[in-house]
Image (tube, rainbow, N blue to C red):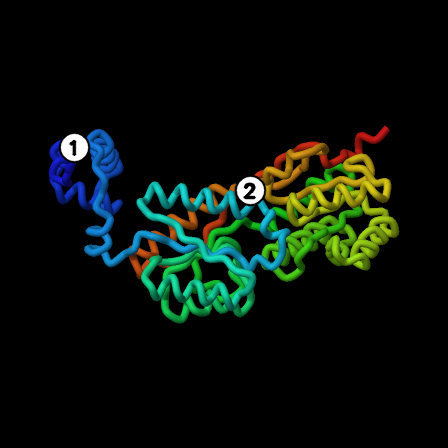
């Protein structure tokens, strides 16, 4: 059986250095950590996780809390699988595992989170949503449990570490992009008027329209199960002669493209679309979506990294981490200035 002493001899360091390297200690240089890692791989050394847990008091597992899965639409969002993949990949690099909490209601989520922590199955949590008076975050705050939010927190903003994009800037960028291509009648469309992401993007839309001296509209709520909303949506497009839509996400954009076709509107010939998230749905059918890449992999990696810092050092300062975005230009926006 390969021991730490064997790894130390192979790497040409002391056993204590190997131990610190295994803990990713900042007192060890990256060059030394890499040398220890190569020695471990060459010898086939597997760390004794039980011994590490006993020595550190850590479980080396983090919990990821998904938002309440209130309907099938949320389950179909590629974002959640992409973010989980990114978090899990970073966790593996840092010798952590991932446990998931999911339910239909916030109260059930709170119960799961409490059970996971009180049974010492996790060291902290990454929360993939933000709700006002959220019982999960209230529990985590009350008992000073390490956690990080992906997205902007509704409550405890100064007392929370969160990783997010600048959603207001993203929406303003979309307005400017469309206006530069001759669009002035721009409508914001969403399937959720309560989430923090919606609020931030809609505020950005309003600011962008105001700065350009353009008329902004109340956001259009699109729900295929509510005929009155669909009727109001198409009436707004026809009455206001809307030429472009800014849609909260790629999955909804695909549904709206199909819906518009029933009324004789084609994208981008009659209506242009800018979307968000740059998911796999963006290039699933033509026209490919012009959409914002929110850099999901960075959101996941940075959230896990910040959480581990908080787990290992309770004095770690809370911070706001902003991940840059890029606009992927494809086929769903027509340049009206090139019209013959």
Near mark 1 (Cα within 10 A), the count class, few <14, some 14-19 or many ≥20, is many
Total labels drawn: 2
Q: Earlier in the sequence, mark 2 or mark 1?
A: 1
| Residue farthest along the right direction in this orientation | 239
**x, y percentage for residue 287?**
72, 33
**x, y percentage for residue 220?**
75, 55
Circle 1 SS class: helix
Residue 78 left/right relative to 271:
left
In the picture, the quarter occupied by the N terminus is top left
Residue linked to disc 1 = 11
Is residue 173 among the parts visible in the rendering?
no
Q: Is 177 located above or below residue 228 in the figure?
A: above
Q: Which one is nearer the viewer's eye here, 323 or 269?
A: 269
In the picture, the quarter occupied by the C terminus is top right
Residue linked to disc 2 = 325
**x, y percentage for residue 113?**
43, 63
Residue 26 left/right relative to 289:
left
Circle 2 SS class: loop
What residue is rendered at 82% in x and 56% in y?
Answer: 232
Q: Is 11 located above or below residue 176 in the figure?
A: above
Q: Which one is nearer the viewer's eye here, 64 or 142?
A: 64
Is residue 44 among the parts visible in the rendering?
yes
Residue 34 left/right relative to 295:
left
Residue 275 left/right relative to 268:
left
**Rendered image quadrant of residue 59:** bottom left
Residue 158: which disc? none
């Amino acid at each position: 059986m390969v021991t730490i002493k064997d790894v130390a001899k192979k790497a040409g360091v002391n056993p204590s250095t190997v131990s610190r390297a295994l803990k990713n200690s900042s007192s060890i240089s990256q060059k030394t950590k890499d040398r220890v890692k190569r020695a471990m791989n060459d010898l086939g050394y597997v760390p004794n996780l039980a011994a590490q847990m006993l020595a550190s008091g850590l479980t080396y597992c983090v919990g990821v809390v998904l938002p309440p899965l209130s309907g099938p639409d949320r389950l179909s969002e590629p974002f959640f699988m992409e973010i989980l993949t990114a978090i899990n990949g970073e966790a593996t690099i840092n010798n952590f595992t991932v446990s998931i909490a999911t339910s239909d209601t916030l109260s059930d989520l709170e119960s799961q989170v409490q059970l996971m922590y009180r049974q010492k199955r996790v060291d902290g949590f990454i929360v993939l949503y933000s709700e006002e008076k959220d019982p999960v975050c209230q529990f985590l705050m009350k008992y000073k449990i390490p956690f990080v939010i992906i997205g902007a927190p509704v409550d405890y903003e100064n007392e929370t570490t969160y990783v997010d994009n600048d959603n207001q800037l993203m929406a303003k960028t979309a307005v400017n992009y469309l206006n530069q291509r001759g669009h002035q009648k721009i409508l914001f469309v969403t399937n959720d008027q309560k989430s923090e992401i919606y609020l931030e993007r809609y505020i950005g839309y309003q600011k962008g329209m105001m700065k350009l001296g353009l008329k902004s509209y109340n956001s259009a709520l699109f729900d295929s199960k509510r005929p009155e909303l669909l009727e109001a949506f198409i009436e707004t497009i026809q009455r206001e002669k809307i030429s472009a839509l800014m849609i909260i996400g790629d999955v909804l954009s695909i549904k709206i493209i199909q819906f518009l076709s029933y009324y004789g509107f084609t994208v981008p010939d009659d209506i242009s679309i800018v979307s968000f998230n740059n998911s796999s749905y963006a290039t699933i059918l033509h026209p490919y979506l012009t959409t914002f890449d929110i850099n999901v992999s960075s959101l996941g990696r940075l959230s896990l990294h910040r959480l581990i810092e908080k787990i290992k050092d309770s004095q770690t300062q809370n911070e706001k981490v902003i991940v840059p975005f890029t606009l992927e230009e494809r086929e769903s926006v027509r340049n009206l200035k090139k019209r013959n």
